[in-house]
Image: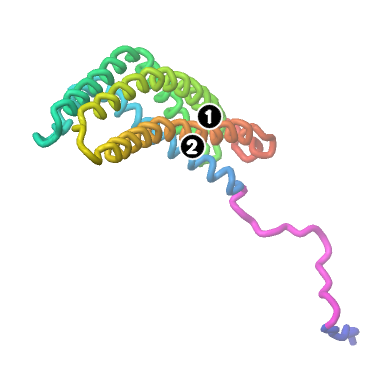
Amino acid sequence: MSEVTPFDPYRSPSLPEGPYAGKPGSGRPQVLTALIIICLVMGILGLMNSLFGVVGVVGGQQLQQAFQPKLSSDVPQGMQKAQDKFQSDINNLQTKFRLEMIGTLVFRFLAALLLVVGGFKALGKQESGRKLLVAGCAVALAFELVQAIVQTLINTEMMTAFNSYTESVMQSLPDKPGTENVKRFVQTVLKVSIYAAIGLPYILMAVKGGVYLFGLIYLRKPHIKALFKPA
């Protein structure tokens, strides 16, 4: 008869001998999958923004004039003149920086195309997809830096036009008792609006630049490269 080992409830069960294989998985870390999907989404959005940007450069002024609402007749005439002058200053800025804007659009399109093609191939664990995604992150990171410089040049001159617009709006308001508080409120709202419109793109550039920099480093790690199929 075989010897029966008594069961001891206070003793931990013995583990089987030999290496533990573990639970089989897809072989792709969740961080890698998330990075590929994020790059793919940003690439698709980049392609869409490039197409919309071309429309804006070619016919943006005409479209803006067609859909820009006119102020009502109750609004002081000076405010309408201030708005028209401000719009004219913006159009002049777009004309002045037209070449820079076209260059950044081409740059954005190239980076987005690399991210989209590389992202789809990387989802299939193709080595060519990883390489294209690395190239896409490098080009996209360079684009964000160039975009920040160009945007800063445009914003510097736009602030001059905005300050002139704010001063014209303040002068167009009637001087009546109690209107000082209204003027200060309008001036504060205008400043907050323009500062938010200027500052938000820089925050988005910093976030996207961080993602691209992380992808550029992470996708070149040896254990990540080993997950992709060679060509």
Does 163 sit above or below residue 9?
A: above
Q: Identify which residue is drawn at 41% across, 19% down.
A: 156
Q: Identify which residue is drawn at 46% across, 31% down.
A: 202
Range of magenta residues: 10-27
**Residue located beneath label 1 in the image:** 137
- Binning the other alpha carbons within 10 Å of mark 2 as few (below 14), some (14 to 19) or many (20 upward) gives many
Amino acid type shown at disc 2: Cys
Query: Dot 2 lies on which element?
Result: helix
Q: Where does the image place residue 25, in percent across and percent down from the top left?
A: 61, 54
Q: Where does the image place residue 30, in percent across and percent down from the top left?
A: 58, 49
Image disc number at residue 68: none
Task: Judge by depth and name the residue closer to the eye, 222 or 57.
Answer: 57
Task: Judge by depth and name the residue closer to the eye, 174 or 224.
Answer: 174
Q: Identify which residue is drawn at 52% across, 37% down.
A: 122
Among the two numbered marks 2 and 1 on one chain, the one whose residue lies closer to the N terminus: 2
Residue 231 forms part of the magenta stretch = no
Q: Gap in Å between the C-alphas at discs 2 and 1?
A: 8 Å
